[in-house]
Image: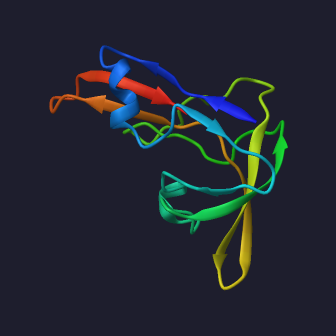
Amino acid sequence: MIFEAEDRGILKDKMEQQCIAPTKLEIKVGAQVMLLRNQNGGLSGLVNGSIGKVIAFVNEPASNFRTGSDGKLLPSLNTPGELLPKVRFVVDQGVTRDMVVGREEWTLEMPDGEPLGARIQ
C-alpha cells in the first residue's frame, strides 16, 4: 500500500525537510513499522518509537484518535472506506496489542502559534 502525504500552508514545500513523517510511505503486510507519536498519552504503552509489524490492511476506524488543546476529540483525518494498516505491537514481555493506525497531522508554527505549514500522513 502507498500512502501519500498531504502538505499545506505557506511552508508546504519545506515539509519534506521539516517533518519526520515521509512524503510517500510504502508498506506491506509483514513490514516492520515505528510509531512517530505517543498514543493515548502513552498510557496504552504505545509511544513514539514503538515498533510493530503490519498484520493486515483493514477498512476499520483508526485506533488512534486526535484531541485538541481543550481535550475534545477532533475529526478523523482518514478518508471513509480507506484501507488502514493494522499493526501488532509487543508492549511488555511478550504481551501484544493490535492497533489500526490512522493518519496524523504535523504542523509548523511561529512562536505565537501562527500556522506556517502542515503535513497529514
Asked whether, in this view, residue 42 is left or right of residue 3, the answer is: left
Compared with 12, 94 (above or below) is: below
Q: Residue at x 59, y 43 (%)?
A: 65
Front-most of residues 89 and 71: 89
Front-most of residues 10 and 28: 28
- In this rendering, the count of numbered labels is 0
- Give percent across and percent down for residue 5: 55, 27
- Give percent across and percent down for residue 34: 57, 57
Compared with 48, 61 (above or below) is: above
Q: How is the image coloured?
A: rainbow
In the image, farthest residue toward the left: 111
Quadrant hosting residue 9: top left
In the image, farthest residue toward the top: 10
Asked whether, in this view, residue 96 is left or right of residue 38, the answer is: right
Q: Residue at x 51, y 62 (%)?
A: 47
Q: Residue at x 37, y 39 (%)?
A: 69
Compared with 88, 116 (above or below) is: above
- Give percent across and percent down for residue 80: 76, 24
Q: Quadrant of the N terminus?
A: top right
Front-most of residues 110 and 61: 110
Q: Residue at x 60, y 64 (%)?
A: 51
Q: Quadrant of the C terminus?
A: top right
- Give percent across and percent down for residue 14: 33, 25
